[in-house]
């Protein structure tokens, strides 16, 4: 449970205590939430030193979801993206090690469903950290100080782990059984995105986990969620956790991120939803 990013001026003196140094905001947020989306990676490649710093500033068990670069999703629109993908995974993402959660790929509203193109993209995505390191090794001309691939023996080297991917779509043509079947074939989660009605809210379970982004129910990125709305989302999450909302009846891991960040509602809504689910999560841990 968490928010989309953590560095917002509107949060200072509201969620963050007055006078808290900016360099301590991640540590503070991670002390109250158990996951955050890394958004900076969408706008450009980050440095390995940044990923290592973010990893070190968060407690054991914390998870980052990392947003894939817009060069892949928006500028190239999924065409000829093998090298950009390699550069992304070579840029330090893997330095998060056991704190690396799902990778989020957000498509632009103009991009309609093209089965061949989407399948080509999904087939390129690495499904383990070892596969990601292998892809990263064929990166473009990144300078050495901007490269971290986690080779055996490297500082911070990691054990191999599965790597999950989630796809957020914004064109209504993705609402099709062909799309859902394709995502299930590649175990890729279709993001459940609440966008104040601007883009489709698709509620199909297509992977062994569920990924939810709550951008605002009334005003995109701005409006907070009412108690009744949080109750309703808590009910949905319980259903995914328990399997009652899943086609095979099997429970899923669920990642929820609030992106209604503009007026500082996101962290408080995340805490409100987390409180509603605390009993369910405790039961799951005990089972």
Image (cartoon, helix red, strand yellow):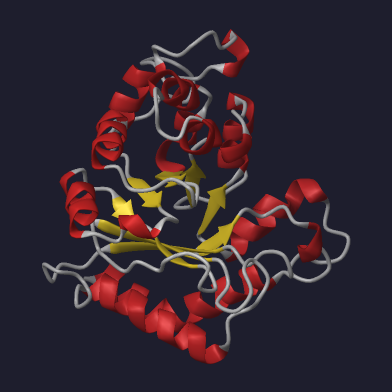
Nearest to the observer: residue 213 or residue 250: 213
Query: Which residue is located at x 50 percent, y 47 percent?
Result: 108
On the image, the x and y values in percent for residue 171 come to 42, 55
On the image, the x and y values in percent for residue 197 come to 50, 73
Quadrant of the rendering where the C terminus is positioned? bottom left
Nearest to the observer: residue 178 or residue 277: 178
Asked if residue 65 lies left or right of residue 216, the reply is left
Residue that extends furthest to the bottom in the rendered view of this protein: 228
On the image, the x and y values in percent for residue 138 come to 39, 11
Residue 45 seen anywhere in this rendered image of the structure: yes
Residue that extends furthest to the left in the rendered view of this protein: 248
Asked if residue 204 lies left or right of residue 95, the reply is left
Nearest to the observer: residue 118 or residue 183: 118
Query: Which residue is located at x 50 percent, y 78 percent?
Result: 273
Quadrant of residue 210 within the rendered picture = bottom left
Q: In this picture, is 25 found above or below 280?
A: above
Query: Which residue is located at x 62 percent, y 53 percent?
Result: 5
Residue 280 seen anywhere in this rendered image of the structure: no
On the image, the x and y values in percent for residue 248 come to 11, 67
Total residue callouts: 0
């Amino acid at each position: 449970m968490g928010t989309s990013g953590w560095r917002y001026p509107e949060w200072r003196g509201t969620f963050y205590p007055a006078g808290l140094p900016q360099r301590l905001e991640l540590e503070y947020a991670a002390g109250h939430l158990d996951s955050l989306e890394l958004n900076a990676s969408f706008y450009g490649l980050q440095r390995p030193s940044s990923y290592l710093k973010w990893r070190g500033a968060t407690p054991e068990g914390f998870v980052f979801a990392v947003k894939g670069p817009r060069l892949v999703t928006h500028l190239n629109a999924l065409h000829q993206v093998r090298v950009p993908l390699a550069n992304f995974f070579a840029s330090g993402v893997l330095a998060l090690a056991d704190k690396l959660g799902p990778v989020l790929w957000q498509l632009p509203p103009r991009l309609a469903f093209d089965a061949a193109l989407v399948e080509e993209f999904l087939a390129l995505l690495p499904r383990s950290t070892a596969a990601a390191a292998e892809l990263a090794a064929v990166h473009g001309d990144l300078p050495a100080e901007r490269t971290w691939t986690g080779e055996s023996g490297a500082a911070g080297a990691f054990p191999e782990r599965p790597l999950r991917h989630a796809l957020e779509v914004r064109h209504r043509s993705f609402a099709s059984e062909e799309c859902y079947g394709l995502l299930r074939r590649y175990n890729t989660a279709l993001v459940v995105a609440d966008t104040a009605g601007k883009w489709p809210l698709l509620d199909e379970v297509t992977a062994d986990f569920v990924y939810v982004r709550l951008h605002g129910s009334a005003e995109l990125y701005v409006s907070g969620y009412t108690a009744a709305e949080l109750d309703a989302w808590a009910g949905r999450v319980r259903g995914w956790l328990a399997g009652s909302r899943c086609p095979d009846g099997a429970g899923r891991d669920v990642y929820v991120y609030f992106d209604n960040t503009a007026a500082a509602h996101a962290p408080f809504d995340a805490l409100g939803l987390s409180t509603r689910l605390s009993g369910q999560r405790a039961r799951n841990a005990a089972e």
